[in-house]
Amino acid sequence: MGAGADAFSLAQNNGKAAKQIIPHVHIHIIPRYNDKGTVWTKRQIPTDEVLFELSQKIKSAIV
């Protein structure tokens, strides 16, 4: 994966009980690293530009 992750998890949290304010469907792609375990950590992408580049890599991989 383009984030340098060893693997990734997919998560889908929908509905009021999942803490959504506005109901909508979305999927989280969560990078996983062998040395960090499976703890949900804060996003460590430093800038919007880096996030945009990563989003383009994800799009090209699934299209």
Image (cartoon, helix red, strand yellow):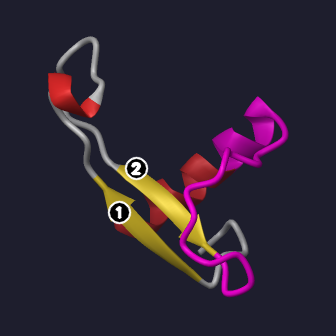
- As drawn, which residue projects farthest toward the right? 46
Residue 9 lies within the magenta run: no
Question: For mark 2, does the 10 Å Cα neighbourhood hold few (<14), some (14 to 19), or many (20 or more) residues?
Answer: few
Q: Please identify the quadrant where the N terminus is shown.
A: bottom right
Amino acid type, residue under disc 1 in the picture: Leu
The residue stretch that appears in magenta: 33-53
Residue drawn at (72%, 75%), measured in percent from left and top?
4
Residue drawn at (76%, 48%), measured in percent from left and top?
44
Q: Nearer the viewer, residue 17 or 1?
A: 17
Question: For mark 1, does the 10 Å Cα neighbourhood hold few (<14), some (14 to 19), or many (20 or more) residues?
Answer: few
- Disc 2 to disc 1: CB gap under 8 Å: yes
Q: Which residue has dot 2 on it?
A: 28
- As drawn, which residue projects farthest toward the top? 22
Quadrant housing residue 35: bottom right
Count of picture labels: 2
Mark positioned earlier in the residue sequence (2 or 1): 1
Secondary structure under tag 2 reads strand
Q: Is residue 28 above or below residue 17?
A: below
Residue 36 lies within the magenta run: yes
x and y percentages locating residue 21 in the rendered image = 28, 12
Magenta span: predominant SS is loop
x and y percentages locating residue 47 in the rendered image = 82, 35
Residue 10 circle label: 1
x and y percentages locating residue 11 in the rendered image = 32, 56
Residue 34 appearing in the image: yes
Secondary structure under tag 1 reads strand
Q: Is residue 41 above or below residue 63?
A: above
Quadrant housing residue 16: top left
Residue drawn at (24%, 33%), measured in percent from left and top?
18
Q: Is residue 6 left or right of residue 59?
A: right
